[in-house]
Amino acid sequence: MTRTLIAGGLVITAAEEVHADVLIEGSRIAALATPGTQNWTADRVVDATGKYVIPGGVDAHTHMEMPFGGTFAADTFESGTRAAAWGGTTTIIDFAIQSPGQSLRAGLDAWHAKADGKCAIDYGFHMILSDVNESSLKEMDGLVAEGISSFKLFTAYPGVFYSDDGKILRAMQRAAGNGGLIMMHAENGLAIDVLVEQALARGETDPRYHGEVRKALLEAEATHRVIKLAQVAGAPVYVVHVSAREALAEISRARTEGLPVFGETCPQYLFLSTDNLAEPDFEGAKYVCSTPLRPKEHQAALWRGLRTDDLQVVSTDHCPFCFTGQKERGRGDFSKIPNGLPGVENRMDLLHQAVVDGHLTRRRWIEIACATPARMFGLYGRKGTIAPGADADVVIYDPAAEQTISAATHHMAVDYSAYEGRRITGRVETVLSRGEVVIGQGEFKGRPGHGGYLARSTSQYAR
């Protein structure tokens, strides 16, 4: 059993900051101690003096190899998890998709086949319900029992993922009984489709109109509606990729009333805006995602929501499509632009920049990027913290290093960066996944297949 000693760093968890040596035995953290007070021997010593020692990031919202609009997300599980590791993320939770007319099991099996033996870091799955019926509702119970404890439904994308209120209510009622957590993409898709049709009829075809038709009020309306459906069902609800201050206000109001309502936002809503969607020469297509980017004034509300804990998690919704050959499908019709942004490699760094800029404390950085996503989705104890018994998913982070984000240097399988040219302070130096170095000395030292599938418990946060 290999023993690794990480010496002299500032260990930061959601609960505390302490200078400590960290001893790793095999794949688990064995002990922490005041620097230099223990005569530990180790096969490998990592000097973390002047650096942060933080838990590996937990990105609870990714879409590797996801089919969308006749194409597929550019990152495979192999390339996407390798890029995640470069960015200090050591666990992803991706979305297996039930195809209409098919069983949940068939969808789950298809995603296991995509990921098995390919991942550089550990991974789990949520289940997208595309077809809510008696059979799929019964299947939910079995999936929770085997570690698929969260289910995503959509009020958006009619004809693809959309579920009506009755189906959403039935799924929420089932989750109330089996301990599952319902995740909601909350936008009024039926109304949005009307606005899309009207915009195109007026000749409004550029990418910026994607943001204009997917109105903040329609995100807020759908958020309000799914909260009330969850209240009727007696179930918690987790609203994904919150982008609009009006939607956040609905979540804040529900939480003030004591309801088990939770929210996630993403770096793109904190750092990008409709100014990007309006970039000329079709460049705005790079920034088409749903929910859409909002005007800059929404950002202050989202940062405040993260500080007040009305938003608990920052995930990426990583769903990359290349500009050439994929985003270009929407030239002349913004509704045909594949929806999604690359970001799994950038999240930890961007959130550290938020610490530098004064938006977050260091502990809150770790809380929203590591600890709470692990708790929310039944992984805490193994993931999201540095403590004896936890998996040795550990990142040595240099808080003083400077870097410029660019597609020329990133490791995601996509031909642009949503944050091209952005200068930030902080950089991942070394990454361990279950005690094995996967990033070190500026090199990828991991391998496909090191990452293992994670069966998850029910939420340790939402109940």
Image (tube, helix red, strand yellow):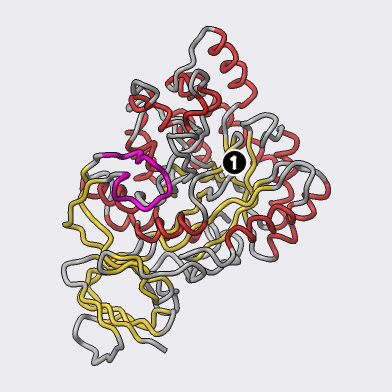
Relative horizontal placement of residue 279, taking residue 141 as reference (left or right):
left
**Residue 246 appears in the picture as rendered:** yes
The number of callouts visible is 1
Q: Is residue 408 magenta?
A: yes
Please say if 250 is above or below 28.
Answer: above
Residue 231, quarter of the rendered image: top right
The residue sitting at 66% across, 57% down in the picture is 179
Q: Is residue 302 magenta?
A: no
- The quarter of the image holding the N terminus is bottom left
The residue sitting at 51% across, 25% down in the picture is 330
Q: Amino acid at mark 1?
A: Met
The residue sitting at 39% across, 76% down in the picture is 436
Q: Position of residue 416 (x, y in %)?
A: 36, 40
Residue 335, quarter of the rendered image: top right
Q: Secondary structure at mark 1?
A: strand
Q: Which residues are magenta?
A: 407-420
Relative horizontal placement of residue 460, taking residue 295 as reference (left or right):
right
Please say if 195 is above or below 141.
Answer: above
The residue sitting at 40% across, 69% down in the picture is 446
In-front residue for pair 24/461: 24
Residue 299, quarter of the rendered image: top left
Q: Position of residue 187 (x, y in %)?
A: 57, 30
Give the labeled residue for mark 1.
Answer: 184
* Other residues around mark 1 within 10 Å, as few (<14) / some (14–19) / many (≥20): many
Q: Position of residue 239 (x, y in %)?
A: 54, 41
Relative horizontal placement of residue 288, taking residue 34 as reference (left or right):
right
In-front residue for pair 276/393: 276
Q: Position of residue 373 (x, y in %)?
A: 47, 56
In-front residue for pair 389/452: 452
Identify the main secondary structure in magenta: loop
